Amino acid sequence: DIVMTQSPDSLAVSLGERATINCKSSQSLLYSSNNKNYLAWYQQRPGQPPKLLIYWASTRESGVPDRFTGSGSGTDFTLTISSLQPEDVAVYYCQQYHSHPPITFGQGTRLEIK
Amino acid sequence: QVQLVQSGAEVKKPGASVKVSCKASGDTFTSYYIHWVRQAPGQGLEWMGLINPSVGSASYVKKLQGRVAMTRDTSTSTVYMELSSLTSEDTAVYYCARGLKFSLYFDYWGQGTLVTVSS
């Protein structure tokens, strides 16, 4: 199974500042045949289901604000929120879909306002 | 628009079974996989398995094999997840989620169903 490890576990950032969340996989998520990284990011606000933000490591889902950016390749990935807004308070998860079963998630990163 | 609507909360005793439904609308039911993901109280997301509604085949996470079954009814565009031999560790919110057939990220999610296992 591919193990996904996020860092940090929690993060406090001031409004308008940048937030950076890291995700590391135990195996490469890059398929050489199509040069795609099989990595997604989700946002989960309290009491709600997760919401897809980013797929293929860097493709923003329709309707997601452009302050959310995904980057990285292979085993190391980053989700960056360029200017934190109040509605960004949530738990963020990375997910690999390169090798399954099973599909696996990171443990989550809790983002709060400082 | 695409919607996944799940059945309501359940309270079960240890050793019992639970069956949660997920009704899809707004797109072709058989064009996607439906996944089940659960989340224990205060914990992260755990993928349980998927079903291909067009043929009814399913794939499950190893730790749940033998206890979980995912089925579908194409006439009502509904997928079911049944979990048997429940213990307190199965207390969680259960989500269904839609994934494309060749790229298994989840673009639409159900609202979640809380299953509580308690004596």
Image (cartoon, rainbow, N blue to C red):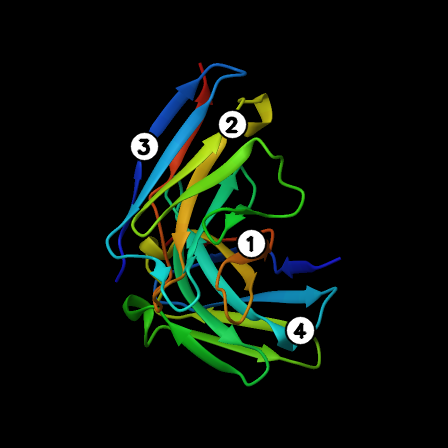
Q: Residue at x 63, y 77 (%)?
A: B30
Image check: A45 left or right of A24? right
Q: Are marks 3 and 4 in contact (CB under 8 Å)?
A: no
Alpha carbon of mark 4 to alpha carbon of mark 1: how far? Answer: 24 Å
Label 4 crowd bin: few (<14), some (14–19), many (20+), radius 10 Å: many
Q: Which mark is residue A77?
A: none
Q: Which residue is mark 1?
A: B9
SS state under label 2: loop
Report the label total.
4
The residue singled out by tag 3 in the image is A9
Evaluate whether label 3 is on the same chain as label 4: no
Packing grade of label 3 (10 A; few <14, some 14-19, many >=20) is some
Q: Residue at x 34, y 68 (%)?
A: B61
Q: Callout 4, which amino acid?
A: Phe
Q: Chain of mark 3?
A: A
Q: What's the CA distance linking mark 3 and mark 4?
A: 37 Å
Q: Secondary structure at mark 3?
A: loop
Q: Amino acid at mark 1?
A: Ala
Gap between marks 2 and 1 measured at Cα: 27 Å
Residue B29: mark: 4
Residue at which label 2 appears: A89
Judge depth for marks 4 and 1 and give the one in front.
4
Q: Are marks 2 and 1 in contact (CB under 8 Å)?
A: no
Residue B21, given in percent of the width and then of the height, sits at 58, 67
Chain ID of residue with mark 1: B
Q: Is residue A81 left or right of residue A29?
A: right
- Disc 4 and disc 1 on one polypeptide chain: yes
How far separated are the C-alphas under marks 2 and 4? 33 Å
Closer mark to the observer between disc 1 and disc 3: 3
Q: Nearer the viewer, residue A43 or A55?
A: A55
